[in-house]
Amino acid sequence: TPALTPGQAAVLGIGRAAPKMVVDEADPKGWGVRRVLPVSLTYDHRIVNGVPAGRFLDDLAELLEHPVQALAS
């Protein structure tokens, strides 16, 4: 988890992508191995509310999962 330094409102931490077993209802086995990228956001609650911070992470996940859609818009 990244630490804020004075003057920062938020900082994004990105880990290393690694294979991980996940639930996959589309797979007949019910599970699959996917590359997972851990991402965390540390922010100053006095400056940034939790709702927009959560929306930012949702939007970032969508962009990372479907990059071609980001280019089309």
Image: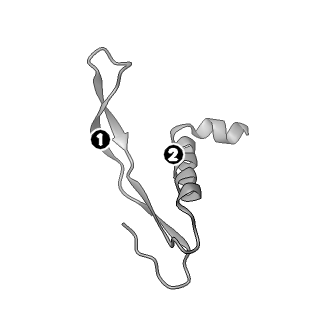
Residue at mark 1 to residue at mark 2: CA–CA distance: 17 Å
Colour convention of the picture: one colour
Q: Determine which residue is flagged by label 1.
A: 19
Residue 28: x %, y % from top left:
30, 14
Q: Which residue is mark 2?
A: 61
Placement of the C terminus among the 4 image quadrants: top right
- The answer to whether 9 is drawn above or below residue 23 in the figure is below
Position of residue 52 in the picture relative to residue 39 (left or right) = right
| Kind of element beneath mark 1 | strand
Name above or below for residue 22 compared with residue 7: above
Amino acid type, callout 2: Ala
> What residue appears at the point 55 percent right and 75 percent down from the top-left corner?
46
Question: Which of these two is toward me, 49 or 29?
Answer: 49
Q: Is residue 24 above or below residue 1?
A: above
The amino acid pointed to by label 1 is Pro
Residue drawn at 35 percent across, 54 percent down = 16
